[in-house]
Image (tube, helix red, strand yellow):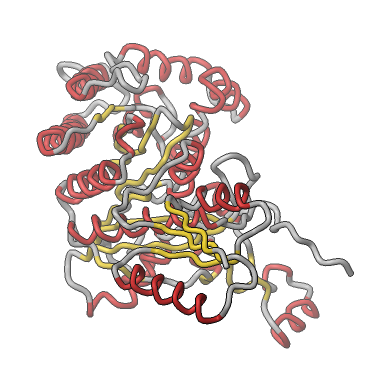
């Protein structure tokens, strides 16, 4: 059988130039997030299949790499003819479910609120495309045990600080923000059944890919009334939302858009909505004011653009409150996102624990930097010593001694035999950041 030299479809090898950029970004992630009080943990790549299939990940649960039982257990499952029993674990599709399991198992030893940083590979049997792999690195920060919007504020400040410190602000990044409860109020206002919220959201989450016509078609196919769908769209069109194009977003418009939406749904007396009763109106006002507090507090403390996007869904079932995505002019989709998921821990321990987090799109950011020929800022010199073939051992020893002095001073020295095509050899080294070349002849 012939060996295959290319990676498995959806996976990739990482070359030295990319690896250097990855390590630089990872070091900045650890440095910045640590300054905000997040402590690093690690969870296994493999997770219990019961946890992965807990109806938290929506369509991602269809993309799980499932792992068969081993040995006698697998044989017995096949003998029984029960295909549901042949799997007992799978590769994690994100870091949030494993984090909640970790917290539930270790909560008595953890400081509250628990601010966790996780960096690791996750796996999805997805269709590979630019910026989307079947194995990819996620970099998450999560806060468990913080019920107030201090959690969202700190999360957005930490993420903004990180993106600025790695130079990503040159790509005009901004945040889209929404609240799942606002989205639910909108669907109820339009006339969608409360019990169908998740089903409607799964379709709405495709809005940026298939447009409203595509969303309408899919919702009609699912049996929803055209007047309900059109009422939802009319609500969106009547909101004085800010311009969504990057670079033209204004934070004050985000607050105006929230107030406009609130006025439209609740009305002066709450009489104009399907959800109209005083308790629900009051709750929606609190939710909208909470979002406004988050936006205004963040932008007072850091120069960042925040856009209220009432159609933002986030493709996970576990979100319960504020949700956010990171946008950039250099990528058509998001380059990160997250939100609040207050109910997930209760699935492990039977009691609610407030929780929220965000994940930056590490692979997408790396791809942008590679395309842009990103140079790592550094004061360290990278020097290449190219030694002619047949160099006597005493002269070679002197060259090595000189290299050790440079290395002890913190510089990087590459020693190699001089190639026949010196120009090509130096060009290859230049792609790795080498700027100084010394040739040693016999």
Q: Report the side of 282 relative to 140 (left or right).
A: left
Residue 213, above or below 19? above
The quarter of the rendered structure image containing the C terminus is bottom right
Residue 78: percent from left, percent from top: 78, 77
**Residue closer to the observer: 315 or 379:** 379
**Residue pictured at 25% horizontal, 67% vertical:** 39
The spot of residue 262 in percent (x, y) is: 22, 23
Judge from the rendering whether residue 85 lies leftward or rightward of residue 154; answer left or right: right
Find residue 386 and report its image quarter.
bottom right
Report whether residue 253 is seen.
Answer: yes
Q: Quadrant of residue 249?
A: top left
- Name the foreground residue: 380 vs 112: 380
Numbered circles on residues, count:
0
Is residue 62 or residue 389 the one in the foreground?
A: 389
Question: Please, is residue 4 above or below residue 251 in the view?
Answer: below
User: Which residue is at a point 14% across and 49% down the rendered structure image?
Assistant: 150
* Image quadrant occupied by the N terminus: bottom right
Q: Relative to 139, say whether 405 is above or below.
A: below
Task: Please name whichever residue, 195 or 364, is drawn nearer the observer in this view of the structure.
Answer: 364
- Residue 293, percent across and down? 13, 36
Q: Position of residue 71 (x, y in %)?
A: 72, 86
Q: Give the residue at the far right of this rendering.
A: 1
């Amino acid at each position: 059988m012939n060996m295959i030299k290319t990676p498995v479809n959806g996976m990739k090898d990482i070359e030295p130039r990319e690896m250097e950029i990855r390590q630089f970004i990872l070091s900045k992630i650890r440095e910045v997030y640590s300054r905000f009080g997040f402590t690093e943990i690690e969870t296994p790549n493999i997770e219990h299949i019961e946890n992965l299939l807990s109806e938290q990940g929506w369509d991602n649960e269809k993309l799980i790499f499932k792992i068969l039982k081993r040995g006698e257990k697998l044989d017995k499952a096949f003998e029984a003819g029960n295909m549901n029993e042949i799997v007992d674990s799978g590769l994690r599709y994100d870091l949030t479910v494993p984090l909640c399991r970790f917290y539930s198992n270790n909560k008595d030893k953890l400081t509250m609120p628990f601010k966790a940083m996780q960096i690791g590979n996750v796996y999805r049997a997805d269709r590979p495309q630019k910026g989307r792999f079947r194995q990819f690195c996620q970099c998450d920060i999560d806060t468990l045990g913080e019920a107030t919007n201090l959690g969202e504020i700190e999360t957005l400040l930490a993420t903004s600080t990180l993106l600025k410190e790695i130079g990503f602000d040159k790509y005009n990044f901004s945040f889209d923000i929404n609240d799942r409860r606002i989205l639910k109020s909108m669907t109820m206002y339009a006339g969608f059944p409360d019990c169908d919220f998740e089903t409607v959201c799964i379709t709405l989450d495709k809005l940026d890919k298939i447009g409203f016509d595509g969303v309408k078609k899919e919702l009609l196919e699912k049996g929803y009334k055209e007047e309900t769908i059109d009422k939802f769209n009319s609500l969106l069109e009547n909101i004085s939302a800010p311009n969504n194009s990057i670079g033209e977003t204004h934070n004050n418009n985000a607050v105006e858009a929230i107030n406009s939406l609130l006025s439209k749904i609740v009305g002066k007396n709450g009489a104009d909505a399907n959800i109209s009763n005083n308790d629900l109106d009051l709750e929606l006002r609190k939710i909208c004011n909470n979002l406004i507090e988050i936006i205004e507090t963040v932008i007072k403390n850091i120069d960042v653009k925040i856009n209220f996007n009432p159609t933002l869904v986030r493709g996970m079932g576990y979100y319960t409150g504020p949700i956010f995505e990171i946008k950039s002019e250099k990528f058509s989709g998001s380059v990160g996102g997250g939100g609040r998921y207050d109910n997930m821990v209760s699935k492990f321990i039977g009691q609610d624990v407030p929780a929220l987090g965000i994940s930056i799109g590490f692979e997408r950011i790396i791809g942008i930097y590679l395309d842009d020929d990103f140079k790592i800022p550094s004061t360290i010199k990278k020097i290449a010593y190219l030694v002619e073939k047949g160099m006597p051992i005493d002269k070679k020893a002197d060259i090595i001694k000189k290299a050790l002095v440079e290395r002890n001073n913190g510089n990087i020295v590459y020693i190699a035999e001089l190639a026949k095509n010196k120009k090509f050899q130096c060009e290859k080294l230049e792609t790795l950041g080498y700027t100084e070349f010394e040739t040693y002849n016999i």
